[in-house]
Image (cartoon, rainbow, N blue to C red):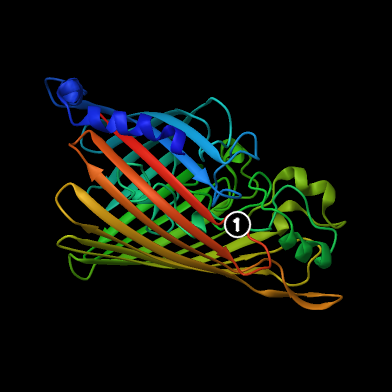
Amino acid sequence: MLRYTPLLLACASLSATNLFEPLDYLSNNLFYETEDGVFAIQGGGSVEISGYYFNQEPVGFVFPNPPTDHTLFSPRLTLEADAWLGERLSGSIKFRWDDGIDPGYSNNSVRIDELFIDAAIAPGHFDVRVGRFATIFGNYVPRQSAWDNPFISPPLAYDQATSVTDNVAPPNATAFANRRNANINGHTWIPIIWGPVYTQGAAGFASWRDFDLAVSGTNRALSSRPPVWDDYDWSDPTFTGRLGWTPVAEWNVGLSGAFGAYLKDSTQATLPVGTHVGDYDQVTVGLDATWASGPWQVWAEALFSEFDVPNVSDPAQIYSYYVEGKYKITPQLYGALRYGMQFYNKIDTPAGKQRWDYDVLRAEAALGYKFNRHALIKVQYQYQYQFANFQDGENQIAGELVIKF
């Protein structure tokens, strides 16, 4: 990442100058409304320039090319628009050009991440959403944009590949357990939740007093990888729900759950005779909490996920948590810390009970500075430790410049 530091510093210095005054004009004029007020549209977007340096393998879902490289430069352009028709209908679209949903995941990726319509059935109390949208699970996704996320990367549960695969079944329990000794392969191994999980489906949102409820049915599981989010096969849907409670303004707590098949159709050829990809489910539950007061913001999640793995008698279980805090040192400068751990259960093998993956911890620190309403710069350090006799990613430094309009 050091080779990109001059670029980031140059961009940061520009953000403090009058060269960003045109963005004020642009932002103030990306709104249109008809004279009768029936239809309105608000546009916007951002440019993100990120750089990474890692001493071994990358930490989390970062994909250098070639894989042996220790640096990665990752730009992204986001264009989005929200529209309203009358008092009950609204819609949103989010378009991106980058090198993949995760840094380096693909080359020259052009895609629509979100495209949905909302209908207010009972305004202020019950809405319905149809289209392509981010998961309703947990409390990370609503703040996952580069502008709102105090860090550059997602939390551990959304960003750590496990040795569960969705494209091929292990031949037996021993082979499955032995995967833990191989290098992590983010293109074939899957996490508990793959980032924002922009899947397709329908969702309902209800609110009553201090409670809010969201439920959805989508085409793919929480752990599904980005290429299958576009799959129009609805034979094995995933159902997700979250119940939130806001007892006072400073607090919000939530309970989430999700259930559905996680294997790709291409896995069928490797499954036991008489079984189908729809027979193997991922079940996930999570408890989340948010607290904010004065210059402080704190987020936390605790998750449990269980995968039915073909040819393995015991389910593969994962326990994961993280705690994250942000403190505004000044109105423009903030610091943030995050700590998370992930644990794996033991499964039966001919050699006895064995863990199918190695427990892991991750500690992260970030510093960010908002020059104005258009420019933000962040730096982040990540340390990851795997409870094994080798480390698959350990130290990583990242920097990011975000220009918003």
**Of the pair 242 and 252, the residue shown nearer to us:** 252
Q: Residues within 10 Å of mark 1 (few under 14, many from 20)?
A: many
Above/below status of 216 relative to 114: below
Left or right of 147, for residue 87: left
Q: How many marks?
A: 1
Q: Is residue 32 visible?
A: no
Question: In the image, residue 178 lies at what x, y percent?
Answer: 78, 63
Q: Which residue is mark 1?
A: 260
**Of the pair 52 and 205, the residue shown nearer to us:** 52
Question: In the image, residue 194 lies at what x, y percent?
Answer: 53, 50
Left or right of 395, for residue 387: right
Which of the 4 image quadrants contains residue 305? bottom right
Above/below status of 133 relative to 392: above
Which of the 4 image quadrants contains residue 307? bottom right
**Residue at horizontal 34%, vertical 40%?**
118
Quick one: quadrant of the C terminus?
top left
Most extreme residue toward the bottom, as rendered? 352
SS class, disc 1: strand
Which of the 4 image quadrants contains residue 181? bottom right
Looking at the rendered structure, the kind of residue marked 1 is Gly
Above/below status of 403 relative to 219: above
Left or right of 397, for residue 104: right
Q: Is residue 98 visible?
A: yes
Most extreme residue toward the left, as rendered? 35
Question: In the image, residue 87 lies at what x, y percent?
Answer: 20, 37
Question: In the image, residue 55 lies at what x, y percent?
Answer: 56, 49
